[in-house]
Image (cartoon, helix red, strand yellow):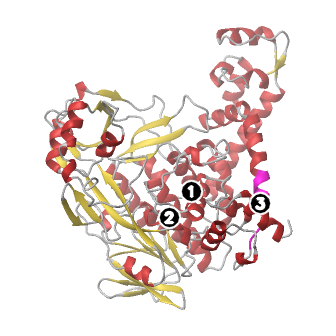
Amino acid sequence: MFPNEYDVIVVGAGHAGSEAASAAANLGSKTLLITMNLQNIAQMSCNPAMGGIAKGQIVREIDALGGYSGIVSDETAIQFKMLNKSKGPAMWSPRVQSDRMRFSETWRDMMEKTLNLDFYQEMVSSLIIENEKVVGVKTSLGIEIRSKSVVLTNGTFLNGTIHIGDKQFGGGRAGERASTGITEDLLSFGFQSGRMKTGTPPRVDGRSLDFSKMTEQPGDEKPEKFSYLKSTKTLTNQRLCYMSYTSGTVHELLKEGFDKSPMFNGAIKSSGPRYCPSIEEKINRFADKDRHQLFVEPEGWNTVEYYINGFSTSLSEDIQFKALQQVAGFENVKFFRPGYAIEYDYFQPTQLKHTLETKLISGLYFAGQINGTTGYEEAASQGLMAGINAHLKVHEKDPFTLNRDEAYIGVLIDDLITKGTEEPYRMFTSRAEYRTLLRQDNADFRLTSKSYTIGLATKERLETMEQKEKESHAFIHFFKNKSISHEILNPILEAKDSATVKQMDKLYKPFSRPNITMDDMRKIKEVDDYIIENDLDREVLEQTEIQIKYAGYIDKERANADKLNRLEGIRIPENFDYSKLKSLSYEALEKLRAVKPVTVSQASRISGVSPNDISVLLVYMGR
């Protein structure tokens, strides 16, 4: 029925599991993906969208590394927006509205075409551990499948409980049963677990809505895409999204259900996502607000189902319905299904190494919501890294990790394993101290060569990146060396209320001004001729403009990163005895013992470890 032994078994086929299985298989490992329902691979359980603030950067990083999320997002997009375009490029974040059914279908199609990847539909109930090493899994039917490594990506299914008002029932997602056995098994091996909560809004019938009473939310006029590959699709047509608002009347109706709300009656005791609260939390926490935005988003090209973004709730279905009827455009609303909250088990991520391998059990990796994160993008990036590292360990190769100045993925994983989390972790640009370096436009420059070296990114990806890099560097060189007369420059500068010049100057100088754009520069014949003659595409033009305008900021941030990376190079022995350091604070001693940082830099980021504690550590290590 199964081969004698797999290299990698991935448990769970959500976004983390799909990326993990694909990465391991593409790298050459004999891989098995086990899921409770093969019809729901990479299911978009909540919002049918990918990307957003900081999340879009993660999707582009996944793509640059050779993962599938960006490609699938492009192939199934129904609307594209580049968020924060009015701010600096460090804040630009791509986002697509996706066709929910086609997204899952496309993921499955890509994985079925992936060599070395097998599938099996069953529930994994326990792990097979021998001598503190994972050697396989056992299913609910009692089938034992052997492997050299296991990646757990169980999402919200571990002992999942769904809440709708005062009704509770087991489930990992609407219409799907919870997964049991794994939590209890891991606890017996000494792991620490907790509970978290997330929620989802009602889904409604678009035929029952009056969109004329809502505000249209179109996509970008010139939509871009996630994947750096030239072969993926760019949108030509887009579906409209809409926006409406709650009101005081809506809030009063929602409050009628608070007595039965699991959020307020004690039924839910776990932490939910702070930055994506339920509608009942919003009106309770922000009582001074008389309305909240609701984004009305289509679920696909050929469906009437809509997602009510901003109306996540665990209130009873009758309260949800009555309140939503009072929203403009929803007077005759029909439900496809009510919103619900879900509680599930997670494991404190401080129990992991940077590779996402557990510290307690060799060859066992955790990725996604099992680590306390929320969001498809955060899960997918962890799955990709876990799949890569499971393969590398099995084949006795060096691990693959990313630093905080190399990728948002590096920030995410370092935050999790160093600080842990007591609430669902969501990525924001503010979490990254080097966000000018970690832009969405340069993820290929940062990561594709690294991935190609380990064998995941294809030669096509590498050559595409190298060509873009070569063209943008040449164009920057052109601006630095091309002189232009003030007679040509000044009309362009005057049109932008920018100070004029009195003599011939290099093009680099006026272009570096914040209010002068590439479109302004193209009014100069020599610039436009260069672009046309060299057939430069949008990505090269964008990269050139960013590198010229933000050169000072980029150089300063790179210098800061290099300075702090010196501490990253000071490694702490694996079984270092911190009790030798008598001058350490008690809190630092406890935290350092628990986290077991790999470098002094990581130790400095642990909550409760002071600069004085780091000085003590450096002195002891002869620094």
Residue 422, compared with residue 551, is above or below; it is below
CA gap between label 1 and label 2 equals 12 Å
Q: Which residues are magenta?
A: 562-572
> SS class of the residue under badge 3?
helix
> SS class of the residue under badge 2?
helix
Q: Which residue is mark 2?
A: 383
Query: Can you say which quadrant of the picture contains the N terminus?
Result: bottom left
Where is residue 601? Give x, y as percent.
72, 61
Q: Is 354 positioned to the left or the right of 141 in the image? A: right
Judge by depth and name the residue closer to the eye, 533 or 371: 371
Where on the picture, by quarter, is residue 165?
bottom left
Where is residue 221? Give x, y as percent.
45, 28
Q: Which residue is mark 3?
A: 567
CA gap between label 1 and label 3 equals 19 Å
Where is residue 416? Give x, y as percent.
55, 61
Any magenta on residue 438? no
Q: Name the N-terminal-most of marks 2 and 3.
A: 2
